[in-house]
Image (spheres, rainbow, N blue to C red):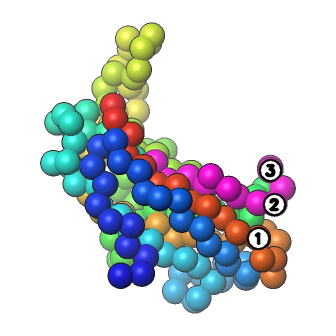
Amino acid sequence: MAGSLGVIAEGGVVPPIKGSITGIDNGPGNGQEDWFWVEFPEAMAMGNRPNAGKLVATFAVNPGDPMNPDYRLEVYTACNKMPFEGLNATYGPGTPPAREWEFFDAHTPPNPNPNPNPNYLNNVPWPAKVFIRVIRVANDQSCSEYTLQVSRMPT
């Protein structure tokens, strides 16, 4: 099915996704956007929460001005919600389109820092399925191509 990136277990990576949108964003559902969805089942982790992995969606290639590249993304947990709603404090409702998104679900960051992750909130539901909306924000009518990378890194 077009747009489906599949199911990713901890340590998994989706092959790079290439795309091109010629028009500037004109709002969700108006045709100048690419939509993808991916599943990150909590049960497919090497450990239990809070050690269920780090989810990442980022642009491996995002052409244009490095300070204001052509493409951005939004992440949804359901079709009837606002972008980034219910994900965490950094990416909450009202967050503008981003260049990258991470969901890091771990108390203790990697060595050498032994302090707990101050951003961890155990009341944030695990994002088992997310919808990623890619939009163009600069260089209207250009044929530049983005490369989106989605992964679930081990914690």
Q: How packed is label 2: few (under 14 Cα within 10 Å), some, or many (20 or more)? A: some
Tell me if I can see residue 76 in this picture.
yes
Left or right of residue 112: residue 67: right
Q: Secondary structure at mark 2?
A: strand
Q: Main secondary structure of the magenta part?
A: strand
Q: Outermost residue, bottom direction?
A: 30
**Image height check: is 124 above or below 147?**
above
Measuring 73% from the left and 82% from the top, which residue is drawn there? 23
Badges 2 and 3: C-beta atoms under 8 Å apart?
Answer: yes
Report the mark closest to the observer, 3 or 1.
1
Rounded to the nearest angstrom, the CA distance separating label 3 from label 1 is 14 Å
Measuring 40% from the left and 60% from the top, which residue is drawn there? 85
Q: Which mark is residue 88?
A: none
Residue pointed to by mark 2:
64
Residue 128's image quarter? bottom left
> Residue 122: x and y, percent?
24, 38
Badges 1 and 2: C-beta atoms under 8 Å apart?
Answer: yes
Measuring 19% from the left and 34% from the top, which residue is drawn there? 47
> Residue 31: x and y, percent?
59, 88
Sequence order check: which comes first, mark 1 or mark 2? 2
Point out the image quarter for the N terminus.
Answer: bottom left
Which residues are the magenta region? 56-67
> Residue 69: x and y, percent?
76, 58
Tell me if I can see residue 88 in this picture.
no
Mark 1: amino acid: Ser
Residue pointed to by mark 3:
66
Rounded to the nearest angstrom, the CA distance separating label 2 from label 3 is 6 Å
Rounded to the nearest angstrom, the CA distance separating label 1 from label 2 is 8 Å
Left or right of residue 111: residue 32: right
